[in-house]
Image (cartoon, rainbow, N blue to C red):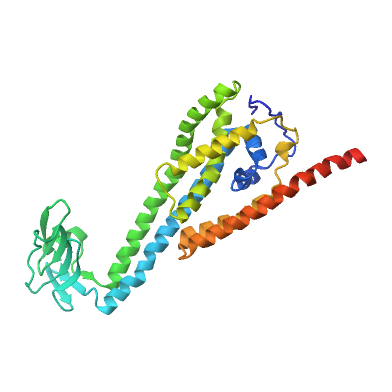
Amino acid sequence: MDISSPNQPPVEREGCLSHFQWLFAGLVLPCISTGYYRRGMQRGPLPAALVIIMLGLVSAGLGTLGLVQGMMKLTGEIRAAFASGSVPEIVIQDGVAQVYGSQPHILMNQDGMLAVIDTTGAITYIDQQYYSQGILLTRTELHVLNRQGEYQRLQLSDLHAIVNANPILINAETVENAWGQFSAILGVVVLVGMSLMNTIVRLAYVALLALLVWGGFSLLLAKTDFGSVYTVGLYASVPAMYLNYLLGQIQVNFVFLHTLLLLAIWIAALGLVFKGPVKRSEPGNLRLWRVWVGIPLLVVMALNIVFQWPQGATIVWVAAVLTLAVLITEAFFAPAQEAQASVEPKAQ
C-alpha cells in the first residue's frame, strides 16, 4: 500500500519484516524508533491495528489474572475466619436457621452499617435510626436494609426455593466453593469487557482523535492523508499505555491522562516522521535487537500486574530506568557505527 505522504520512499518489498516479527517489534520499537513509524506508515493501518489488538488482549488477560489471583487470596482468609470462630457455621433446614457459635454474633458494626447473626431473639430488627444499611439473620428470617432505606424481610423457607437447596450449609467449604465460582464468572466478564475496551473501543477512540490531529496537520502539510496519521496514532498508543501504567504506579492518575500522553507522543512522532528528507535505506534499519532490551521491562510489568508485589512500583521503575539507560547509550553509539558502515564500501 503506497502512502502519499511527503519524504517517504516507495515501499521496498525485499527484506521486509515478516508479519510475526513486525507484531513482536511493535511491543517496543514504537517507544524508541522513528524508522518504525515510517515503515509503519508504508504498511498502512491494518498492521498497526493488529499490534494494538495483540497488546490489548495481552493487557486484558494480565489484568484478569491479577483480579482473579487477588480474589483467590481471600480463599485462605475465608477458611481462617471459620476456623477462628470469627464467622460461625450456619445450617438452614426447613426454613429454620441453626448457628454453631455464640450469639448475637456481630460481623460488622461501623459507619452506619450492621451485619449480625442472632437466632436467640435478642435482636429482632435493624434500627433505622442508627443504621443506613444492614443484614440480620434471625431464626426464620433474613432482614436486609439497603442504602435507599428499603427494609425487606425474606422468610428462610422461601430461600430454599431461591437457591434450590435444603438444607443450606454455610461453612468454610461451601463459602470457598461459592467464592471460587463467583471469581470464575467475574473473571470471564472482566476479560470480555477489558478485551473490548482495549481493542475495539481503543481503535475507535484513536480514529476519532485522528480526525482532529489530521485536520491540524493538513493545515501544515497539504499531502498528509488520514491513513498515515491514524497509523502513527495507533503506534503512539503503545508508549502511551506504558507511560500511563508507570505513572499510575506512583499514584499519578487523572482523567484524560492517557489521552494527553497519547497526543503528545503522537504529535511528536508525526513531527519527526515528516521532518526533513528520508534516506531510502532508513526504514529498513530498525536494529531489531533493541526489542530484546525492552522485553525484560515488559515482563516485570506483566508480573507486577498479576501478582501485585508490595514493592512493585519501585521494581517497575528501576527496570524502566535501566532499560532507558541502555537505549540512550545505544542511541549515542549507533550513528557513529552507521556512518562508519556507510564509508567502508566507498573505501573499497
Give the residue at x 52% y 57%.
302
Give the residue at x 40% y 63%.
70
Quadrant placement of the N terminus: top right
Please count the marks in the image.
Answer: 0
Measured as percent of width and height from the top left, residue 202 is found at 46, 40
Instruction: Choose between 271 and 242: the one closer to the eye.
Output: 271
Q: Where on the picture, by quarter, is residue 131?
A: bottom left
Does residue 43 show up?
no
Q: Relative to 221, is 147 above or below? A: below
Determine the residue located farthest toward the top in the rendered image.
222
Q: Relative to 346, is 288 above or below? A: below
Measured as percent of width and height from the top left, residue 273 is found at 64, 33
Q: Where on the picture, by quarter, is residue 196?
A: top left
Measured as percent of width and height from the top left, residue 278 is found at 71, 32
Instruction: Choose between 214 and 188: the one closer to the eye.
Output: 214
Give the residue at x 42% y 48%.
194
Q: Relative to 246, is 15 above or below? A: above
Does residue 157 show up?
yes
Give the residue at x 32% y 66%.
177
Q: Where on the picture, by quarter, is residue 132?
A: bottom left
Instruction: Choose between 258 and 91: the one closer to the eye.
Output: 258
Give the side of residue 41 with respect to residue 306, left or right: right
Give the side of residue 84 with respect to residue 269, left or right: left
Quadrant placement of the C terminus: top right
